[in-house]
Image (cartoon, rainbow, N blue to C red):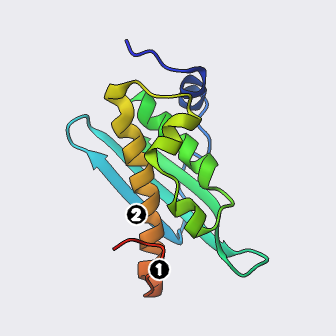
Amino acid sequence: MQNYSKEVMDHFLNPRNIGKIDAPSGEGEVGNPVCGDIMTLYIKVEKNSKKEDCISEICFETLGCGAAIATSSMITEMAKGKTLEEAWKISNMDVAKSLGGLPEPKMHCSNLAAGALKKAIRDYYKKKGETPKFIDK
């Protein structure tokens, strides 16, 4: 059995922002065929008072282990309210640290969560026909 932090257990047992957004501004799906985890993140983007694109709503649907659910939940908490550029900078290590760490065999879950967020942001800009400078090619 893995040793999980209190934060991981809390986000696994009480996931935040679970569900789907109808007509999302962006959607990102990732999966790991080795472990079977599948994550989909949905974002709704609106302008803030400075006319910057911000994540006003974010939800997830995840099929996977406790760490996959916990990292999905945590990244939604971390990204909500941020500009897309700020959200883009959230790394897998940021997610793991916010959860009080992950066992090494479960670090791939934080990679999936960060990857799903980046895919959702890319999808938003693809729909607009834009590629902002902060997105690495």
Q: Residue furthest left?
A: 34
Looking at the rendered structure, the kind of residue marked 2 is Lys
**Residue at the (65%, 56%) spot, across then down:** 80
Q: Is residue 10 left or right of residue 126?
A: right
Q: Is residue 28 above or below residue 1?
A: below
**Residue at the (40%, 63%) spot, across then down:** 119
Residue 51 in the image: state x and y as whole percent.
72, 82
Q: Would residue 71 be visible to someone looking at this image?
A: yes
Residue 26 in the image: state x and y as whole percent.
48, 69
Residue 104 in the image: state x and y as whole percent.
35, 27
According to the image, label 2 marks what residue? 119
N-term-proximal mark, 1 vs 2: 2
**Residue at the (56%, 60%) spot, across then down:** 87
Mark 1 crowdedness (10 Å alpha carbons): few <14, some 14-19, many ≥20:
few
Residue 85 in the image: state x and y as whole percent.
56, 68
According to the image, label 1 marks what residue? 133
